[in-house]
Amino acid sequence: MTTNTIKILLVDDHPLVRDGLRARLEAMPQFEVVAEAGGAAEALEQAARHPVDLVLMDINMRGANGIEATAQFRQAFPRIAVLILSMHDKLEYVSQAIQAGARGYVLKDAPGKDIVVAIETVMSGGIYYSAALARQLAQPQSADNQLTSREHEVLRHIANGESNKQIARALDLSVRTVETHRLNIKRKLGIEGQAELIRFAVQNAQ
């Protein structure tokens, strides 16, 4: 190995995935996989034992997820870069990962060369997103534009902190219809929880 080798820690709870990543990365002379882990706690232990430059981190894991683990790495090992490798393409995950300290986000179904480019970009001080995510990030209002005028009305009332019953009374709708509008809004925006919906409404309702 050369002195410029990038030393990598693989973190994924599927051994077969780690095996495939190790084989792909170690086929290139600039990379060396120095350790593997199946979860956050083990990953932190491995980072303390081995010289690690970069962590390739999955999100779905037992115990602490990859976003929580990224935050733990930023605090314990601020010099180690974290690159997320995940099947999740929702911008909410991307935003949470970057806020936690990740330096990039690569989709698992992206071309193999993307991982190589991502690692090299991150290690040179940049931030990397898979092309599909970069396109979404370039059009942050596109999902919002898919909402109907009625859904925008419901969103404005949600931003005001109103309950389904209050919204139904204000818009002369049934409570069940308001619930349906809420579900459709969340589906279109890729939002899962009520707290996330309220946060989006407060930030974006006009």
Image (cartoon, grey):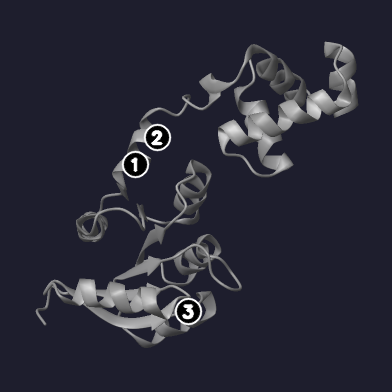
Query: Nearer the N terminus, badge 2 or badge 3?
Result: 3
Q: Which residue is drawn at 64% across and 20% down?
A: 205
Tag 1 near tag 2, CB within 8 Å:
yes
Q: Mark 1 points at which residue?
A: 132
| Amino acid beneath label 3 | Gly
The image quarter in which residue 184 lies: top right
Give the quarter of the figure containing the N terminus.
bottom left
Q: Which of label 1 and label 3 is nearer to you?
A: 1
The image quarter in which residue 68 lies: bottom right
Q: Mark 3 points at which residue?
A: 38
For the residues labelled 1 and 2, the Cα–Cα distance comes to 7 Å
For the residues labelled 2 and 3, the Cα–Cα distance comes to 30 Å
Residue 175 in picture, x, y percent from top left: 87, 25
Query: Within 10 Å of the Cα at label 1, are there few (<14), some (14-19), or many (20+) other Cα atoms?
Result: few
Please tell me whether mark 1 sits on a helix, a strand or a loop. helix
Viewed as shown, does residue 96 lie left or right of 164? Answer: left
Q: Name the residue under label 2.
A: 136
